[in-house]
Structures are given as structure tokens and as C-alpha cells.
Amino acid sequence: MIKLSKTKKNQAMIVFVSQNNDEQLYPLVKNRPAVLLQVAGKTIIEWFYEIGKKSGIDKILLLANKEDRHLLYKALDDYQETSAPINEIGPFVIIDYDPKKGITEEIMGNLFSDYVTKDSFWLDGNIIFSPNFFKDFLKKAQGTGKYALVKQENDQCLGIGLFATDYLASCALGAKRVNDIFKEVSAKTQSATHTMKYKKKDVEFWQINYLWNLLDANQVLINYIDEKKSGTIEDGATLIGKVTIGEGSRIRAGSYLEGPLAIGKNCDIGPNCYLRKGVSLGDSVRIGNACELKNTIVFEGTHIAHLSYVGDSIIGKHCNFGAGTITGNLRLDDKIVKTKLIIDKTESEVVSTGRRKIGVIMGDNVKTAINTFFMPGVIVGNNSAIGTGVIVNRNIGSNVFVHIDQKQTSREWKIEQKKKKG
């Protein structure tokens, strides 16, 4: 028997952090769960918190396995409070969870006795939405006891729902995704489950089924960032539009920043570089002389220091671009870019990205030598290196060094003295 707490609490968010079928998000999910992917200056889990806080949600409950728990503790360290229980990091509560078993009675008992009020929001870890979407969802969900965002064509839940505790007690056991709870609630209750139909053009909501979906979300969410200019901005730097700059960052003279864009902490920007709309930089990122970035997400610690163009791309953490590294982001025939996914070291069938413009999707700890070129839509795995002059027109796996075998010949060379004119 699951006991319900009599203590009055605010509404909580419960997030499925650890998920089994996220191979399509290779290579970045090899080193982090989807909720720690970055978009528009924040991780997904930080977006959940910031959006939820404005609606009175004071606890984010994270269902995570051992590996993901370790990553969450590290990523959320800034929220840590002294003398807090070991599983609590400020507003976040990490709950032991095995994605193979799903929700157990022990987890349900823990949730209901300590955290969950009469109803709660349940989220998959691979979704993201805007403040406006959640405000509308919350307004329509309140008082229903069961409400979810669903696909129009098949009524499958897209990863967000509000459910009353009375329903959860019998419908959440064994659940591994929000759709599992939604199906059980719909099947076991006599009254109809209230739903919001998903319309792509009208709803600021994204399922991150592929990494390029982050770029779609980034283009919208970057408009919701709070403007903040910390750090040092040198004379001669130009900032236009909404720009947020983290503490310890430096914007050198000659840099041109065209917002909306977000720059993390301790970044070094310029001199003489151009950051265009939609750029999102993590902490300790270096963007150097004569570099241009546009609608691109760059994770922490990456250096793009010399003479590079990076457009509509996602770059993992601690990468280093050699001088003249260029990403192509548009086909010559102007058609939608297609690619192949890398799953378990093998490639999938050709997949449409749905995007006319997309550059490279790059994992963590990748190095490029000078004059490396990427064709639109290629994927590069983690811990790889690419040599001088390579044109990357197909995917590269993890832990691979790609280079060109150059045949070098030599012959005698004499410099003839020029005759002086009389």
C-alpha cells in the first residue's frame, strides 16, 4: 500500500533522466543524459527549472541510474546547498532509478510520501519547450487530473503530462516514459483523458529525437534568454540586440556580436570575430580572430580560435579547431540535408534532417588540423582527430584518426641570379 503524505506541497516535476533508447542522440549522449544537452545558453534540465519556478514548481525530481546520477551531481554543483541531504541539490532531488525496471513501488512510495502533492508534472528527459508553451499547458491542465500533449495522428503522448496522484498509484508502476503512464491512465479510467494536440508550427515544443532538433529549439528559445552583460567588454567591441555574457568572460576589441545569443562564463571572444543570431556558447569557450559563428551550439571548453566558419552546427565539449576549419551548412542544390546516424558503430539508413541548413554534429574531445572541411550533415564521434586538408563528406566514428596519405616528391631547385639592367 502506497501511503500519501498529508503535508501540503507545491506541484513537482518528475523527469525520466535515464532512458534506454537514446542511441539516435549519438555521439553526445555517450557522455551525458539528454537533460544535460545544451540549448540557448542552458542545459535542458536548467530550462525545466527556470520555467517551472515561474509557475510555482519548487522541486524537480530526477529519476536517474548510477552513471547519470554522478553526471547530474557534477553538472548541478552551482545549485548545491550546505547541509542538504546527499540526494538533494538545491531544487533538484535525485532518485535511484533503473530504466530497465521502470517505476517501482519503492520509487512511488518515496515520491508520494515526501514530494508529490495531489497532482504532478511528468516529463521525458529528451524534450524541451518554451515558457509560453508551459504557461498555456499549465492553464489548460489545471483541474483536469489527467492532461497530456499528444500527436494528432495516433494520440501518443509526446513526453509531458499532468496526472493526479489518485491515478498514478495504479497507473505509473513499471512506467519508463510518460507515454506509458498516459496509456495506463487512459485505459483504466472511465472519463476521457484531456489532451493538447501537437501542431508543429503553432507549439513551441520539441522532442529531441535527433541532435539537430536542438538547433530547431535553439532558434526559438534564444529569444527567451535574460539579457546580462557580465565580464569585460573592451572598447571597440560591438553588441547589437539581446546578448547575455557570463561572469569572467572577455569580449575583445573588433568583435561584432549580433543577438540574440548567449555566452557562458570565462569565455574569451575575439578580437575581430563575428557571432551571429542563435549562437550559444558554454563555459570556457574560446572564439578567436576572424571566426564567424551562426545558429551554433558549442559545449564547454571548446576552442575555435583562428579563421573558421561554423554554421548551424553542434560542437561537443573540449574540441579544438585548427586554423581554417570550415563547416559547410548548405547543399549546392539548396535541398533538405540528409544524413546517416551512427548507432553501435554502424550506420543507419539515410535520414532526412528536415533542415535546409545544417553543418556538422561533433562529439566531445575532437581535434581538427588546419584547413579541415566538413560537408553539410556529417557526424563526428567522440575522441577523434582529423588531419590537414581532409574534406569530411561522410561520418567519422569515435576514437578514429582520419588523415590524407600525401605523396611527397622533391627535385633539385636552383635560383637563378637576375641580371642587372644596364
Image: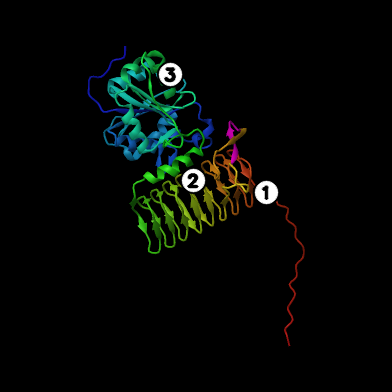
Q: Residue 215 appears at what percent x and percent y?
A: 48, 42
The single residue placed furthest to the left in the displayed view is: 7
Upstream in sequence: badge 1 or badge 2? 2
Q: Residue 327 appears at what percent x and percent y?
A: 57, 49
Q: Secondary structure at mark 3?
A: helix
Pointer 3 and pointer 2: residues touching (CB < 8 Å)?
no
**Residue at the spot 30% in from the left edge and 20% down from the top edge:** 112
**Residue at the spot 59% in from the left edge and 54% down from the top edge:** 370
The single residue placed furthest to the top in the displayed view is: 1
Is 119 on the left-hand or right-hand side of 262?
A: left
Q: Quadrant of the N terminus?
A: top left
Which residue has dot 1 on it?
A: 404
Q: Secondary structure at mark 1?
A: loop
> Which residue type does callout 1 highlight?
Ile
Q: Quadrant of residue 121?
A: top left
Q: Secondary structure at mark 2?
A: loop
Q: Residues within 10 Å of mark 1 (few under 14, many from 20)?
A: few
- Residue 344, magenta (yes or no): yes
Q: Quadrant of residue 157?
A: top left
In this picture, which residue range is highlighted in magenta? 337-346
Q: Residue 375 appears at what percent x and percent y?
A: 61, 46
> Which residue type does callout 3 highlight?
Lys
Upstream in sequence: badge 3 or badge 1? 3
